[in-house]
Image: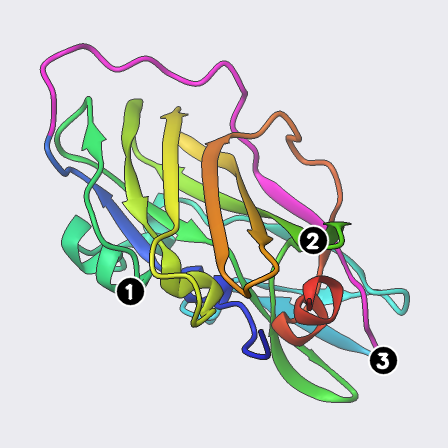
Amino acid sequence: MNHPPRVLLFAGAALALTACGGSSPPQASDQPPVTVINGKVVTWSGAGTVGVPELATVSTPVSADGTFTLTLPGEAALTGQTMTASGVMAALNCSGSLTSSAVGTRGFLVAALTARDASGARQVSAVEGAKTGLLSRSVHARVWLYADGATQLRGTVNCAKLLNISQISDLPVTVAVNTQRGWNVVDLSIEASANVFGQVSAAGTAVNSAAGSAQTTWRTMAELQAQIAF
């Protein structure tokens, strides 16, 4: 398992929440929308900034200790950044489709930032890995989803390529997310385990987060790999 996970494929992917719309009225999340990302980059050197890769005007300075507060963009700044649901699945290296209860609702997904400091530029994500056992690992990521209306997203997609582990051909991620208009916080959790024969299985969920604007820790994929390597 020497290939780094590819959660960064979420980075800046735009999202059109239009796939397979149902007829039931949308139900909003009971979590209020957020307007900022409060974070801390785990490895930081000198002065610098973090910003959304696809939105050049959306950036903020980072303190010497790696902490930052990034104001999330409004709807006008996201004009022209959306794509079809099939395009999003391709960008995420996930196969399958989601149902949306409100056809026409559109959004934008941010799950990585470009960090620039004295050591150079790199991509970081709000992701944490843990060795939960001798042959088990967990990965928890947080992403921010802008939606221009309330909708329910449901379905299971195969995101095996997100972890980029040759032994995993199927990684079902069950999505159960309700959006409000504005920026919604979503938690992605993946559990993986191996057996003594080197076979690895994994599954995950994506659900509304109750974290709100709480501070999140941001790291590179190489740093995540160091946390979860078998």
Q: Is residue 173 left or right of residue 217?
A: left
Quadrant for the C terminus, please. bottom right
Q: Which residue is at the front of the view, 229 or 90?
A: 229
Question: Is residue 25 shown in magenta?
Answer: yes
Q: Which residue is at the front of the view, 141 or 109?
A: 141
Q: Dot 2 corresponds to which residue?
A: 128
Residue at left offset 66%, top offset 70%: 225
Q: Main secondary structure of the magenta part?
A: loop
Quadrant for the N terminus, please. bottom right
Which residue type carries mark 3?
Answer: Ser
Q: Which mark is residue 91?
A: 1
Question: Mark 1 against mark 3, which lies toward the viewer?
Answer: 1
Which residue type carries mark 1?
Answer: Ala
Mark 2 Cα shell of 10 Å, populated few (<14), some (14-19), many (≥20): many
Q: Dot 3 corresponds to which residue?
A: 45
Query: In the image, which residues are magenta?
Result: 21-46
The percent position of residue 220, horizontal first and vertical second, equals 66, 71
Tell me, yes or no, if residue 42 can be seen here: yes
